[in-house]
Amino acid sequence: MQPVRVLITVPDLEGESDIIKQIEAVSDRVNVLFKPCKTNIETANILKDVEVLYTQTPPNHLDYANCLRWVQLCFTGVDNKVENQMFDPHRKITVTNGAGAHAVAIAEYCMAAMGILTRNLLQFFRDQQSTIRDRSHSPVLDLHCKTLCIVGYGQIGREVARLASAYHMRIMAVDPNPDWRTSSGFQWPGVGDPQGNFPKEFFTPGQLHQALEQSDYVVCCAPLTPKTKNLFSHKEFGAMKSGAYFIHVGRGPTLDDMALAKALENGSIAGAAVDVFASDPDPLPPDHPMWTLDNAYISPHVSGNRNRAYFQKMNDILCENLRRYLQGESLFNVVTRQRGY
């Protein structure tokens, strides 16, 4: 059988010989070429005779990619890539992403954020800086048996549900496909909720407010599509309980951050933790009210930080998909221009 030329352009894998060896070990048919590229132009210029591309810098133009049949992306969000030529149906290129590789890290961030907000740790840290010991700042909520609404029940949402179940939280999920309880994405043992067993109720996006009204905690991990832009704005925060907390780890533009700031200022909700804003990768403007709110915790898009554990998980996806590709089987994590994820 013909060899399959696999080009890897992910710069972070430089020096990671064991990860490269795992890819080579998938099959004797695999011919791996590693050339780190930091721009999509660099990648575009070395695609001749390449059948499989593993990259974090997908090229905008595929003039030299007549043999390309599959692109494995080293990231998840593709909302800013849907006009790329790799999604052109005439080229017949399958595109897969890294959905799930961040799930453990981001879910742990969400649970940590719930703890920080619920236990009032932000205020206690401020007290510490001022050498104050004030027990009146003691928290009024426990996570135990509270209601959690997860908006976007993909790999991240499913892992949040698994962790939250340890607190016996009542879990609800909002997803465009509420009947799809089972996950079709790549699955690691002991991670997530592949059978959709944890949510007590599933809601459609049209029922979002119905779910928000019941929730003590809301975690947004939704992808960005035309339908999810500003998914959380004034009406959504108005539908939440005044004592509820909001955690945002989805794509930045799914959140109207000025609406969130207003809700926090006027007490419509109790607090929020936000890892991604619409301005990302640029920071919020210095005069943005989120910087100075006492009931907000913000971080610079690090909930799913790209450490070695992340790249090992990405390699797990790539190797299993490569095995499937060679066997002519369907791949995990296929993304399309129509869905936007």
Image: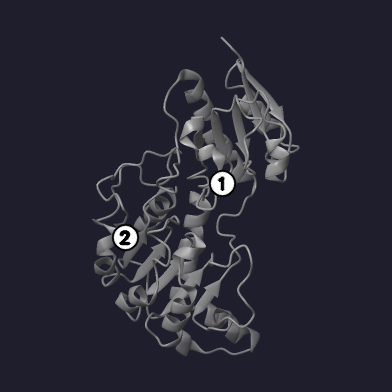
Q: Where 34 falls versus 279 (above or below)?
A: above
Q: Where 95 falls versus 120 (above or below)?
A: above
- Give me the C-alpha separation between circle 1 and circle 2: 32 Å
Q: Amino acid at mark 1?
A: Phe
Q: Where 307 falls versus 17 (above or below)?
A: below
The structure residue drawn at horizontal position 58% and vertical position 62%, both measured from the top left corner, is: 301
Q: Give the farthest residue toward the right.
A: 15
> Is 244 on the left-hand or right-hand side of 82?
left
Q: Sequence-wise, which precedes: disc 1 or disc 2?
A: 1
Q: Position of residue 136 (x, y in %)?
A: 46, 89
Residue 107 versus residue 254: which sits nearer the camera?
254
Q: Give the farthest residue toward the top.
A: 1
**Quadrant where the image shows the N terminus:** top right
- Label 1 sits on residue: 75
The structure residue drawn at horizontal position 42% and vertical position 71%, both measured from the top left corner, is: 246
Task: State which mark lies toward you, 1 or 2.
Answer: 1
Q: Position of residue 254 (x, y in %)?
A: 45, 64
Query: What numbered label is drawn on residue 242?
Result: none
Residue 104 versus residue 320: which sits nearer the camera?
320
Report helix, strand or loop for mark 2: loop
- Label 2 sits on residue: 168
Task: Tell whether label 2 touches label 1 (CB within 8 Å).
Answer: no
